[in-house]
Amino acid sequence: MYNHDQNFDKATDTPAVIRLNETVVNQIAAGEVIERPASVIKELIENSIDAGSTRIDIVTSCGGKTLMRVSDNGHGMNKDNLSLAIERHCTSKLTHDLMDIKSLGFRGEALPSVGSVSRLSITSRTRENDNAWKIKISGGKIITPTPAALSEGTVVEVTDLFYSTPARLKFLKSDRAETNAITDVFKRVALAFPNIRFSISGDDRSSLDYPATTQFDRLTQVLGKEFTQNAMKIDAGREGVSLQGFASVPTYHRGSALTQYFFVNGRPVKDKTLLGAVRGAYMDVLPKGKHPVLALFIDLDPHMVDVNVHPAKADVRFRDAGLIRGLIVGSLRQAIHSDGEDEGPLTSRAGAQAMMDAFKTGSQTNEPLARSFSGYQESFGNSHHPNSKAAKASKDWARPLDAMPQTYGSFNECQAGFDITDAPSGNVTVAVSETPTNDFPLGAARAQLHKNYIVSQTENGLVIIDQHAAHERIVYETLKSGMENGIPSQLLLVPEIIDMPEEDVNRLAGFIDDFQKLGLEIEPFGSGAMAVRATPALLGETNTQQLLRDLADEVAEWGSAEGLEAKLHHVAATMACHGSVRSGRILKPQEMDSLLRQMETTPNSGQCNHGRPTFIELDLKDIERLFGR
């Protein structure tokens, strides 16, 4: 079946092959190279770096849709080179060996692609020239270069992106989302080149300015001091491949992999091999759904990696992917093992900072950062691995609570009984309960084992309850039930100010009204901070900094505001985890019984929010069979 829009040969009435004009060719290329404003910023920054710049300044407006300006102090271009630079496949960075790539750009497609879908102007001056030259392109139409004023370097200005292909504008996200995407590109490139000063500003953002510095200080500038205080130094090599950088200790993690940065020969990349290697290295030491924060720099012979896989140059292919994966997994596991060695009580934070300071000043040491994993289990809460032997065994014994009343306890009832107590420490707490065992499906609490598991006696056996998982489900269901009418808030006496990356603040700001439905009242507090004015009363005391960080990661995973109800349930689940009684809490007998009674009136209480069983039931006959009775 022929497409009626095709070109036909009138003589034969068959489709005719024609040569596409240059503008259409460039627009087709732009579809691969220029996906969104952040793609333009990436290409222009790479050109500035390849030009030997020591300072790069960026200005954006409306998420880059109406304005993107990149200025640098590089070596610039003369009139003839300026005219060639806007033609496809014209570049100064590539030899005849396509595998011998030692620059960020090399395809010669970026500028003509940008010019075909926007209004583009380039002003440039070399140190040898008396004046600068300016060239303009509008929808692929070139205006002859004219003299201009500029001290040195290059200024590239892009306005009205996709004005010549308006259909593509519909695929762009909100201004805030596009601004965040530009910021992510900006930070990735800034991490790769700490010797260059970067700044970004505009009416759609607060300004960021990263002075030229050391690699360590740039990590602190971009990822924050909290990361560098909880980071392990990585320095390894194998068969001509060098791996350096920093990775967070297992107890410092995020809810998404957005804060994992990889660089290959200075090029920011997003590669499945590298992501998979990191998951493999941390798989036994991180809770499910959590990701480490890291910045890893891989240097190797250009012939060992293909960066020409895609026009956007974000994907790479390694000649020996197994070598790269093995190096990353081995290095990270070794660092985790060394970091987890017993170095005494957790007073090592200062020691770790001293180690970092020593590295920052250039001193060399092979000693691992001294940080014990004290409190490691506490940070994990109830994140048992679903494939563990205990979890597999429990599936045979777990019984859902059938025919439960679809009612909820009040907020006060849900939280009551879980205040911190001064009960004596120990692995076993004996509960003296007056509750009859035959009055309730989950029986009466008799003991608490290992500060986490409640043992309850029923009429026909016993039940073992995971206190954190069970209470997490109770809090989650109560949050869900309160969404329609609003959940009571607990006003803070003094608002808590939480420092956060600007992109996280922007993400949370878009959902302030929705968070308020869940009892969380927040608002932006200047640039790079959130003010928390109230928290859900149901949660009691909670770590608001970690809560906001996890919520920002949740929003980052969504990418948009579609399917809000389902996403609010994700938020409620995150809050429930923060507000649930923790593993390691010693409970009084009446507290344990209170938890059992709430489980009996809560839907889906047989599983926690993550799908793990909240209790295991052992029938008396099964127990007797185990003892051969």
Image (cartoon, rainbow, N blue to C red):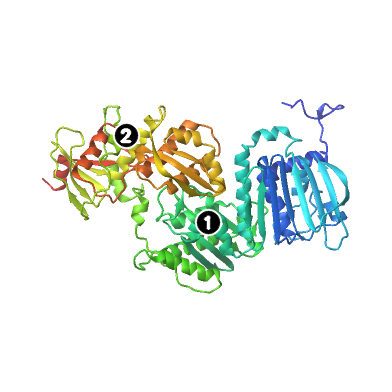
Report whether residue 421 is seen: yes
Q: Which residue is mark 1?
A: 224
> How many residues crowd mark 2 within 10 Å: few (<14), some (14–19), many (20+)?
some
Give how far across and how far down residue 498 sits, in percent.
48, 48
**Image x and y of residue 465, in percent:** 25, 43
Residue 234, x across and y down, in percent: 51, 65
Q: Point out residue 277 in the picture as x, y percentages from the top left corner.
A: 50, 56
What residue did someone put label 2 on?
A: 411
Q: Residue furthest bottom?
A: 364
Residue 629 has which mark? none
- Mark 2: which amino acid? Phe
Say which quadrant the C terminus sits in: top left
Q: Amino acid at mark 1?
A: Gly
The answer to whether residue 311 of the structure is visible from this angle is no
Earlier in the chain: of badge 1 and badge 2, it is: 1
- Tell me whether the residue at label 1 lies in contact with that at label 2, contact meaning CB atoms closer than 8 angstroms: no
**Is 370 left, or right, of 297 in this rendering?**
left
Bin the neighbour count of mark 1 within 10 Å (Cα to Cα): few under 14, some 14-19, many 20 and up.
Answer: some
Of the pair 252 and 15, the residue shown nearer to us: 252
Is residue 519 rendered to the left or right of residue 131?
left
Could you tell me which residue is drawn at 55 percent across and 51 percent down? Answer: 272
Answer left or right for 50 relative to 468: right
